[in-house]
Image (spheres, helix red, strand yellow):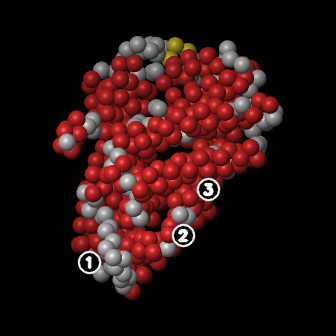
Amino acid sequence: MTAAKKKNSLHTLVLIFIVVLGTAALTWVVPGGEYTREVKNNRTLVVPNSFKYVESNPQGLDDVLVAPIIGFAKAAEIIVFVLLIGGTFYILDKTGAMTTSIKYMAIRFSTKPHLQKFFIPVSMLVFSAAGSIFGMCEETMPFVLIFIPLAISLGYDSIVGTAIPFLGAASGFAGSTLNPFTVGIAQSIAELPLYSGLEYRIVIWIISAICMITFVMLYAARIKKDPKKSPVYEIDLQRKNRIEIHNHDEAVLTKRHKIIMTMFGSGIIFLVYGILGLGWFINEIAAFFLAMGIATGYIGGMKSGEIADGFKEGAKDMMGVALIIACAKALLVVANDGKILDSMLYGLAGIIQELHPIMGAQAMFVVQGVINFFVHSGSGQAALTMPIMGPLADVTGISRQTAVLAFQFGEGWINPILPTSGVTMGVLGLAGIPWSKWARWMVPAQIFFFILALLLLIPPFYINYH
């Protein structure tokens, strides 16, 4: 039965490549078009009302085959980031510090059930706040490798371990309060006071976090009661880092383990400071994990050659993830080269003009979700869509603040299920969860949050949300 399921399962890489092929097919049907772009404050923006149809550039099979290579180059930063994370955690695992610490925490939680019930909500709330305040997104990847074995040790599954950091941050990203990469950029392009409208966004964040935490906790309780109901039950049985606890045997943390985990924990705190206080982004974070991996290896008693081999072995395990990210990026390459991305935005924006302001705001959310299928950078999507959506809001009776909110929802709540998102596929690759299983699990939540977004876009019309 298991073998049949594996045989019939569609590989994630194959799925994404099929989507790329579908996008290439669209370039033969959708008329070519483009907006004029201009650079303002070192940011490339679309010029409103500048759309014009141009000669289409249908993409052939040769273009499709080249696109992942170009995508690999364009996604080089996040791919290097993933490879270095893989190496660092391989070294950390080799020292035994992480495995022993997870077993130690699992024993403590399992012997104190009154504390275990706080594990999911408190952890997810921390990640949600990080997503809401400073736009935590790619930064969740390292935490997936920490929370999966911990969740499994507590009787949950790898979906719960992935959801805690990833969906926790996603709930904050969708309910952004001060996120400079979405709200900050979108408001500046829409010519709104920076972080204006904060009160309603705080309400949205609270609702988003509570709903996401509840969704995960209900699922976790069901899996705790019957582990075989997990979509990844057999995958988790085969995990090398699965930690079994028999008769509550005590985990022995050596002095070296304690030093490593203290350094690692302090490093994560400093990482937050680097992101918030020093303006670190993907390259700086990757360099930080490189340093962490080297330091961890030496403290763990490894020799230089062993540390180098550790990075090589860890990176090797992540190559599948790197290829998935490259193929996801290939989608945007094909859409841009085929001249259909701007045409789709222009056509969708035209629909909004004919609607009532409430329905128009809801349609903006849907449009942002469609665009997000191709463009996954929050700042990139803001630069592409807000120069158009801002003026469009003025002529349709929608406040620009509401247009920013629609962008925020479309960029945040839809992302966690998209097979074309490099971050989503990177997270699932690290977690070892096939996209098909994750998507089936996520569908109820996506339907709920889609409806919630539509409902939350109604009050701004009545409260004069500016």
Q: Position of residue 124 (x, y in %)?
A: 54, 57
Which one is closest to the eye, mark 3 or mark 1?
3
* Amino acid at pointer 1: Lys
Q: Earlier in the sequence, mark 1 or mark 2?
A: 2
Residue 138 rendering spot, x and y as whole percentages:
47, 51
The structure residue drawn at horizontal position 45% and vertical position 75%, both measured from the top left corner, is: 111
- Residues at circles 1 and 2 in contact by the CB criterion of under 8 Å: no
Does 333 sit above or below residue 304? above
**Where's residue 59, x and y in %?**
34, 21
Identify the amino acid type marked 3. Answer: Ala
The answer to which image quadrant residue 21 occupies is top left
Q: Secondary structure at mark 2?
A: helix
- What residue is drawn where x is 50% and y is 67%? 116
At label 1, counting other C-alpha atoms closer than 10 Å, the crowd grade (few under 14, some 14-19, many 20 or more) is: few
The residue to which callout 3 is attached is 129
Query: Left or right: 287 with respect to 387?
Result: left
**Relative side of 391 to 87, left or right:** right
Nearer-N-terminus badge (3/1) = 3
Q: Residue furthest bottom?
A: 255
Residue assigned mark 2: 114
Q: Is residue 376 visible?
A: no
Quarter of the image where the N terminus is located: top left
CA gap, disc 1 and disc 2: 43 Å
C-alpha separation, residue under disc 3 versus residue under disc 1? 39 Å
Q: Which residue is mark 1?
A: 303
